[in-house]
Amino acid sequence: MTDILIVEDDSALNEGIVLGLGKTSYRFTQCYTLHEARSAVQGNEFGLVILDINLPDGNGYDFLKEYRQSSSRPVLMLTANDLEVNEVMGFELGANDYVTKPFSLAVLRARIENLLRLSFSDHGRGRYEDEHLLLDTVKMVYKRDGQSLVLSRTEQKLLQVLLENRGNTIPRDVMIDKVWTDGMEYVDENALPVAVSRLRAKLEKEPANPEHILNVYGVGYVWK
């Protein structure tokens, strides 16, 4: 089930969106102010946010800017203003789509389904997110418990290889070839385990007992 946050002060429209999308695969949290929305995202991860721009206690751009500091999940913005400059601002702040009022619920539903489909296919592009980690090798965003992580270039390459092959064991020689691609003729045999150890220290809650980066004895590594 996908959790969707709706931030819309028009109560009739807010409720209409819920009724119009009313699928058993969606679970909705309805907010009518920025204050309510900020409280809703504390400790919760939404699959998608439907965000109005004009709200009683501020504008959706402020919320979007804050939200992008901790989540890269899709955001669809709603507005009564169809000025191009407003759309550009929304996209520059990280919005994924834009719908101008009044709109068809059928169109809104199609756009939401498309955003969710694209979001969940990010797997193959080097993105991972759970309650502790937000890792996006495309946007180069790396966070643990909301705090930004500094990864070396080698660690970034290593993470990308692991995420893009999630669930598959990657042989050591393949990993070395993909991570150290700068023409080096010789790579120290300890370079890979050292890099893995450093990455684990930054990502894993218990590096000595990793949950994500697992060693497959005699073969290589896998992101579980």
Image (cartoon, rainbow, N blue to C red):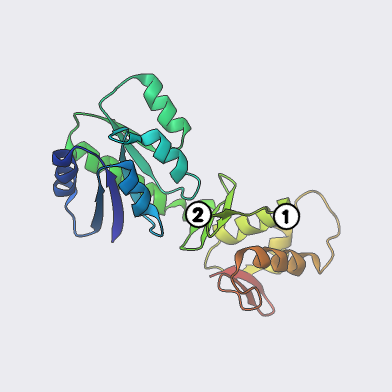
What is the x, y in percent for residue 222? 59, 69
Q: Is residue 80 above or below residue 147?
A: above
What is the x, y in percent for residue 113? 29, 47
Relative depth, front residue between 108 and 123: 108
Relative depth, front residue between 84 and 170: 84
Q: Is residue 40 left or right of residue 195?
A: left
Residue, x 76% and y 67% (percent of image)? 194
Residue 150 visible in image: yes
Going by the numbered disc 1, the residue's amino acid type is Thr
Q: Is residue 97 above or below residue 223?
A: above
Going by the numbered disc 2, the residue's amino acid type is Gly
Marks 1 and 2, how far apart at CA: 20 Å
Dot 2: element? helix
Residue, x 47% and y 31% (percent of image)? 92
Relative depth, front residue between 153 and 114: 153
Q: Earlier in the sequence, mark 1 or mark 2?
A: 2
Q: Is residue 102 above or below residue 167?
A: above
Residue, x 16% and y 39% (percent of image)? 13
Residue, x 46% and y 62% (percent of image)? 130
Relative depth, front residue between 15 and 171: 15
Give residue 10's mark. none
For label 2, the residue is 124
Q: 10 Å neighbourhood of mark 2: few (<14), some, or many (≥20)? A: few
Dot 1: element? helix
Q: Is residue 224 left or right of residue 151?
A: left
What is the x, y in percent for residue 40? 34, 53
What is the x, y in percent for residue 186? 86, 59
For label 1, the residue is 154
